Amino acid sequence: MLEAVRPALIIARREVRDQFRDWRIIFPIIGLTLVFPFIMNWTAQQMLGFTREYGATIVADRLVPFLLMVVGFFPISVSLVIALESFVGEKERGSIEPLLNTPLKDWQLYLGKLLSSTVPPLVSSYLGMMVYLTGLMIRRIAIPEGEMLVQIVVLTTVQAVMMVAGAVAVSLQATSVRSANLLSSFIVIPTAFLIQWEAVVMFWGNQALLWWVIVAVVILTFLLVRVGVTHFQREELLGRDIDVLRLHWIWGVFRRNFTGGARSVGEWYQRVLLQSLRKLTLPSLLSAGLGLAGVLLGISLLSGFLRMMPPGDPEIIHQSLVNISEAYSGSKFALAGLIFIQNIRALLVGMILGVCSFGVLGVAPLFLTMGLAGIFGAFMVSRGFGLVDVLSFLLPHGVMEIPAVVIATAAVLQLGAVLLTPTPGQTIGEAWVAALAEWSRVMVGIVVPMLMLAALVEALLTPHIVLLFLQ
Amino acid sequence: MIVAEELTKIFDDFVAVDRISLSVPTGKVMVLLGKNGAGKTTTVRMLTSILRPSGGFARVAGFDVVKQAEKVRASVGVLTEHHGLYGRMNTEEYLQFFGSLYGLSAGESMQRAAPLLERFDLHVARKKRLSEFSKGMRQKLALVRALLHDPPVLLLDEPTSAMDPESARSVRDAIAQLRNQGRTVLLCTHNLAEAEELADLVAIIHGGRILIQETPEMAKEILLGPPEFEVKLARPLDAWPKVLPAGVTLRESGGNWARFFIESPAQTNPHFLRWLLEQRLEVVSFQEVPRSLEQAFLELIKERESGGLYA
């Protein structure tokens, strides 16, 4: 194992040595390690004095760990610059090709660069935090408790790796440092949002929630590293210039993959679409499992709330349900249209979320909808309605809507997974456009028609069936 | 040895290399000639296992470029178009770094590098930062790097392009010596005089396809016709004889000179000289007209672009 990692360490050592010969990297690191923490110490002391005067000490108490996080974060922000320079700078100067000609494995080169981009800023970050904590002790300000310290150190470490892994993903799409810097907003903006959320959680003082944030960041970092390992390949690095968006080529790849070479609609349905559905077997099972988990979570959430809710009058609930079923006075077809558009909108949001999160957040519409169905069903049952009454609300259109959403979610999972798995003979862009075509194929061929039918049933039939059961 | 069969590389919808086949026996130098964008660099990158072929197969130093990529990379020394030196390192650090990637200790790297540095006059710059190197020095150092692990196969892209004549000569001598030591060399160059001097075989690539793959002499004969000889006379002639010996064709003539295509000069020339004397022509000189690889290359490309014989 050590022998396999040795080339990565050789790469890392050279790059670190190179960094320490560049005053443009050393100066900010020294400043952020030795000067910045004292400024934060002074800020903390001023805030403590100020808030004590006005009796808002909790704000200052929460500010002390927050400033520790800021002290830790600033040096690791340098890792982004180092990583972009290390990955894209080498490409731009042409110095990557001699490296690619050596027997180095792709992952060894990736690991070497990952280490060299994260370790120096992290060491600087840890030193900065130690200086800050020492300053607090000297000024007799209470330092944050152990769990909080651990959380901040873990968050800082993971965020450094996350930014570098993100920089690699960006580097794969850029052939010049300039374009990489422009693309780095895809890392900077989400990271800024993340820091804001972390700040909110820290000021809230909910440490359990902060652990969940850490878990989420760890998962995201793992996925980003996986993307890097998967796509940091010689072919991707030298194969072509990808600074230009070639719409004609994108359309060509999309069309080829969407039609799958079919000569008629019949052939497309029988051969091409069936092929897509077969590929979606595993993701569909996973989606269905997640849907079921959503239902169970809904039921379990409601049982917690029920204890706090006053017992409702079954008659009033019954009448409310009848009213809902009879409420819509407009055209039933217009209602079907509204339902259809709402469902499509939810699935599109799911697709966008899935694209941004390697498919993970793409399950949100399914999970939330099924969770709500679970809450609704559990509530009805708790108020004395039978399971058949509940099913009369959900099943008439649900028999088409639920499978459609499950299939659509599976397609989004697959779309996200494309970034995490190598596709031999295809670049990341080509594989992704092909996966988008496959998603569109499933949507156009199956999901949209099923949702149309489901919307018609929900608008025209479901209310009658519900009334039949309720009356 | 380098062998490629039907090697193809397609980028999206662009065919960069189109089913090329080539063979460079051990201890030979093949020069790959072609215009910019002809597919030379892509071919070299496939042969060094950096790019995965879209079709066909290739073996370099006995290893498959797809299935044994790491072994291929360990067996080839590559001089790329971009030398890719690290400006903040000095010569020794740079060579030790690359040596370590091939499993050499710092001492071994320097031991191997010493004669090469000496040969290319870089020994005086061992401690010099690479950012201070001239273009030619960078190219020489990149060549030293390519030779550091003593590879049996060398793939050299424009090895003398930025060098002064003296340095270029030393590099050409080094390549000739490496060939004599049994190394296989694939050389890409635009310098046709260099190609002519070094090539055992020449392959001309155009639009991703190899148009001709021969020895330089044979390539010239195929592309420019049989060898050409010039006869100069003491006095001008009114007209040159219409009937010539077998294997001799008049190409062009002036008052006291004429040029002939001669098939198989070894057999034909003695007869032809005798015939000239029998005709009582006062021959002042009889010599082969030098023809360069450059002429052959330009002829072929012209033919190709005009949709002619080799299109």
Image: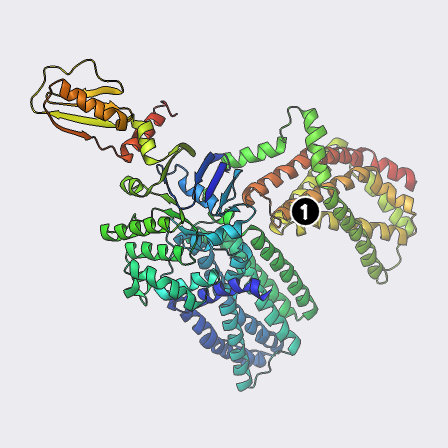
Q: Residue at x 68, y 47 (%)?
A: A413
Viewer can see residue A335: no
Front one among B110 and A401: B110
In the image, is B266 to the left or to the right of A220?
Answer: left
Considering only vertical position in the picture, is B235 above or below A156? above
Considering only vertical position in the picture, is A163 above or below B226? below
Chain letter of mark 1 equals A
Amino acid on which the number 1 mark rests in the picture: Leu
Residue B212's x, y, as percent?
Answer: 39, 31
Residue A435's x, y, as percent?
Answer: 62, 41
Q: Residue at x 51, y 67 (%)?
A: A76
Considering only vertical position in the picture, is B272 above or below B133? above
In the image, is A461 to the left or to the right of B14?
Answer: right
Quadrant (top left, top right, bottom left, bottom right) of the N terminus of chain A: bottom right
Residue B289's x, y, as percent?
Answer: 21, 30
Viewer can see residue B204: yes
In the image, is A464 to the left or to the right of B21?
Answer: right
Dot 1: within a 10 Å radius of its alpha carbon, few (fewer than 14), some, or many (20 or more) residues? many
In the image, is A442 to the left or to the right of B112?
Answer: right
Number of marks: 1
Q: Which residue is mark 1?
A: A413
Q: Secondary structure at mark 1?
A: helix
Q: Residue at x 30, y 47 (%)?
A: B161
Residue A314's x, y, as percent?
Answer: 91, 51
Check the image and name the residue furthest to the top.
Answer: B242
Q: How is the image coloured?
A: rainbow
Front one among B228 and A327: B228
Front one among A99 and A48: A99
